[in-house]
Image (cartoon, grey):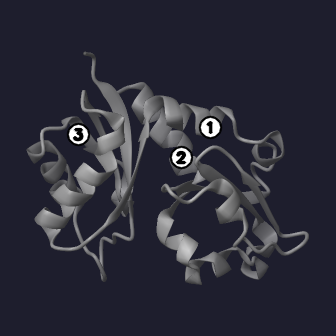
Amino acid sequence: MASTGYVALLRGINVGGKNKMTMADLRDAFAGAGFDDVGTYIASGNVLFRTERPATTLEDEIESVLEKQFGMPLVVMVRSHLQVRAVVDQAPADFVVLNGTHHRDAAFLKLPLTPEEAMGVVQLREGVDQAWAGKGVVYFARLSAERQRSLMSRIVGTPEYQLMTIRSWSTTTHLLALLDNL
């Protein structure tokens, strides 16, 4: 069985302050758990790896490993190379064309949260915010010149937010490029 490339998107870790951990410690934890070709991208909890293990078990397994290693529960969203490729390739055309004028993000969702449920807590300010539901993701765009007026940060106080992790669009596309070369 051939190994598959994945990215684990960790929610709520920090390089300083609450839930502090280093990327070197994360790499060591993943390698110690038997994952191959482990690497990280920027200090915000993006861990790339390869494995032959079933995809359906990875989130629970990684959450368990990290809780044992770091003594804190973490929410982890795992996406395969093909799933990240689909997030990028299937981004709505209206979202893609906003490059340069808008801050764009992808909010990755953890089951059981659906894109429809996530969209239910998204508040949009007309002329500033836009959002689109995708498969396992919600795409956000905020007009750069007006981003301080955005209402998107209001999702932070919702229960649904606990099952989301947000990456900038540039980080998302860079993770895909890294997976392409993993």
C-alpha span from label 2 to label 1:
8 Å
Label 3 CA crowd tier, 10 Å (few <14, some 14–19, many 20+):
many
Give the farthest residue toward the front. 112
Report the residue marked by disc 2: 172
- Coordinates of residue 179 in the picture (x, y in percent): 41, 32
C-alpha span from label 1 to label 3:
22 Å
Badge 3 amino acid: Val
Residue name at image x 30 percent, y 44 percent: 58
Badge 2 amino acid: Thr
Residue name at image x 21 percent, y 56 percent: 26
Marks 2,1: beta carbons within 8 A:
yes
Report the residue marked by disc 3: 38
Q: Quadrant of residue 73?
A: bottom left
- Coordinates of residue 63 in the picture (x, y in percent): 26, 58
Label 1 CA crowd tier, 10 Å (few <14, some 14–19, many 20+):
some
Badge 1 amino acid: Val
Residue name at image x 49 percent, y 55 percent: 111
Q: Dot 3: what SS?
A: strand
Q: Earlier in the sequence, mark 1 or mark 3?
A: 3
- Coordinates of residue 69 in the picture (x, y in percent): 12, 63
Q: Dot 1: what SS?
A: helix
User: Horizontally, is 113 left or right of 132 in the view?
Assistant: left
Report the residue marked by disc 1: 88
